[in-house]
Image (cartoon, grey):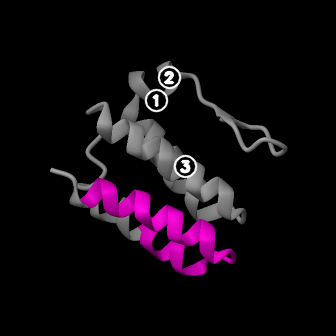
Amino acid sequence: MCINITTGSMSVFPPVLYDKPEESIEFLKRKIISNTEDMETWLIVDILKDMQASKIYNVKGDYELTRIITHKITTMKDKDWARMTEAKLNFMILKK
């Protein structure tokens, strides 16, 4: 994962996510837990949203992952990033 701090844009090579989704999820879980940047948490949740939308991984069916994200949201310093991250999570959980 490569994040341009100036623009906030992120590059993720799709084969990394598509070829081995379980390994990718474990990596992303560790990144959510260890990162200290609110924007990075939002970007990771955005990746997860795309993985769910593409039917690569059932995020809403992964209780541990959603619990990790929910906890991380409560610790985010910037309430706007927290609100936007929570909105993405809710979109994934509530979408049929």
Q: Which residue is mark 2?
A: 14
Which amino acid type is shown beneath numbered disc 1? Answer: Leu
Left or right, 42 with respect to 90, comes to right
Give x and y (percent) for residue 41: 59, 58
Q: Is residue 12 above or below residue 58?
A: above
User: Which residues make up the magenta segment?
Assistant: 68-93
Foreground: 5 or 25?
Answer: 5
Q: Secondary structure at mark 1?
A: helix
Left or right, 82 with respect to 34, comes to left
Decide: few, some or many residues near mark 2? Use Cα within 10 Å; few <14, some 14-19, many ≥20: few
Residue at horizontal 65 percent and vertical 35 percent from the top: 1
Give x and y (percent) for residue 19: 40, 21
Q: Is residue 48 above or below residue 75?
A: above
Residue at horizontal 53 percent and vertical 80 percent from the top: 74
State which quadrant residue 80 falls in.
bottom right
Residue at horizontal 57 percent and vertical 56 percent from the top: 42
Give x and y (percent) for residue 48: 43, 45
82 within the magenta span:
yes
Residue at horizontal 60 percent and vertical 53 percent from the top: 31
- In three-dimensional space, the C-alpha distance between marks 1 and 2, rounded to whole angstroms, equals 5 Å
Mark toward the start of the polypeptide (1 vs 3): 1
Left or right, 76 with respect to 29, comes to right
- In three-dimensional space, the C-alpha distance between marks 3 and 2, rounded to whole angstroms, equals 14 Å
